[in-house]
């Protein structure tokens, strides 16, 4: 294993108001893309800072390739961090920002130039080397921060909400570039994000955090299709709940009459309350006879089952439902 958190705990606050990491057991594989995903205040950034050495645990150990690195400061770990605000040095140009760690380590100039050429070409910032960082766009600053972190060839790269400051189109492009970069260099990437689509795109596995603990760890598909609890089901994507069953919107059938429901499938009386056109699909909102809200999706070119305000039936195939445990 590349990285292991062994019963790590780090708590902040007093007077009954506690935040941080209550206790985490986690193993991350060599070369894996792993995301810590959860709402604000769930402890994901604290977990990342514990891995990077910016926080010291109250209990437990951080191990890298079997070695206990808990007492080591950040600069003595084979781990680098790209922070949310990039933390570039405004008084230095792009080149000097990128090579800063090598200069601090007093590496030979020939080595500095060779590594700078390789990493800046890989991340496609070679034309920017003489430019002040204050003159860079958000996407360019993000690339410089990545190059600065990767030039020392760390085995683990930590990324704390690295794309949150970018607009949607640029964020989507940088997600693609990050994924390609991870596969090229083979380092272990650990992401912290509250953006579930970003986590699912970038990760081999995801850890869902809640109130300082790991609620579930699994592949993006496992997390989405087989959530362990109602919290995970509701946090990742959109979920409909019927008693102890979860049904995703794309698996619901909204029908104009009950007779169209698949044989042996449930059929719930409801009213269509809202329809939204989203380009590739339509989003339908409904309220069933118990007053419960439902969400369904359908291809945009599919005819609506009824007009808004009309009575309809909600159904689903048995294999589309997934049992989830109630939240503790």
Image: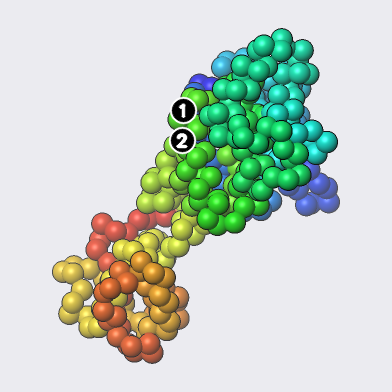
Residue at 18%, 69% in the rendered image: 262
Residue at 72%, 18% in the rendered image: 102
| Colour pattern | rainbow
Residue at 29%, 80% in the rendered image: 304
Label of residue 40 in the image: none
Taking the image as shown, residue 103 lies to the left or right of residue 111, namely right
Label of residue 180 in the image: 2
Q: Give me the C-alpha separation between circle 1 and circle 2.
A: 6 Å
41 up-or-down from 9: above or below: below
Taking the image as shown, residue 285 lies to the left or right of residue 62, namely left
Tell me whether the residue at label 1 lies in contact with that at label 2, contact meaning CB atoms closer than 8 angstroms. Answer: yes
Residue 264: x percent and y percent?
18, 67
Snapshot quadrant of residue 204: top left
240 up-or-down from 302: above or below: above
Q: Secondary structure at mark 1?
A: helix
Residue 299: x percent and y percent?
30, 69
Label of residue 184 in the image: 1
Query: Which of the pair 103/12 is nearer the observer?
Result: 103
Residue 161: x percent and y percent?
63, 45
**Is residue 10 something that shows in the picture?**
no
Query: Which of the pair 93/304 is nearer the observer?
Result: 93
Q: Residues within 10 Å of mark 1 (few under 14, many from 20)?
A: few
Residue 241: x percent and y percent?
42, 66
């Amino acid at each position: 294993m590349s990285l292991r958190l062994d019963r790590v705990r780090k708590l902040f606050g007093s007077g009954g108001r506690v935040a941080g990491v209550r206790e985490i057991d986690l193993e991350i594989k060599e070369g894996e893309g792993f995301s810590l995903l959860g709402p604000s205040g769930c402890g994901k950034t604290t977990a990342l800072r514990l891995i990077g050495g910016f926080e010291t645990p109250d209990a437990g150990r951080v191990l890298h390739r079997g070695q206990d690195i808990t007492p080591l400061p950040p600069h003595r770990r084979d781990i680098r961090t790209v922070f949310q605000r990039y933390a570039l040095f405004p008084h230095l140009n792009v080149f000097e920002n990128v090579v800063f760690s090598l200069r601090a380590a007093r590496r030979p100039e020939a080595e500095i130039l060779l590594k700078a050429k390789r990493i800046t070409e890989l991340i496609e910032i070679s034309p920017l080397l003489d430019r002040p960082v204050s003159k860079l766009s958000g996407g360019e600053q993000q690339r410089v921060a990545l190059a600065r972190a990767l030039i020392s060839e760390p085995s683990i790269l930590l990324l704390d909400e690295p794309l949150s400051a970018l607009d949607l189109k640029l964020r989507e492009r940088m997600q693609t570039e990050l994924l390609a970069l991870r596969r090229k260099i083979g380092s272990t990437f650990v992401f912290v994000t509250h953006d579930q689509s970003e986590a699912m795109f970038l990760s081999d596995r995801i850890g869902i955090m809640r109130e300082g603990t790991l609620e579930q760890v699994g592949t993006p598909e496992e997390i989405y299709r087989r959530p362990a609890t109602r919290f995970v089901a509701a946090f990742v994507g959109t979920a409909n709940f019927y008693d102890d069953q979860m049904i995703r919107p794309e698996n619901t059938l909204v029908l104009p009459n009950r007779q169209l429901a698949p044989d042996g499938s449930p059929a719930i009386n409801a009213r269509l309350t809202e329809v939204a056109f989203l380009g590739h699909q339509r989003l339908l909102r409904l309220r069933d006879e118990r007053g419960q809200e439902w969400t369904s999706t359908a291809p945009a070119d599919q005819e609506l089952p009824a007009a808004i305000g009309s009575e309809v039936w909600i159904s689903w195939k048995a294999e589309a439902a997934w049992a989830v445990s109630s939240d503790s």
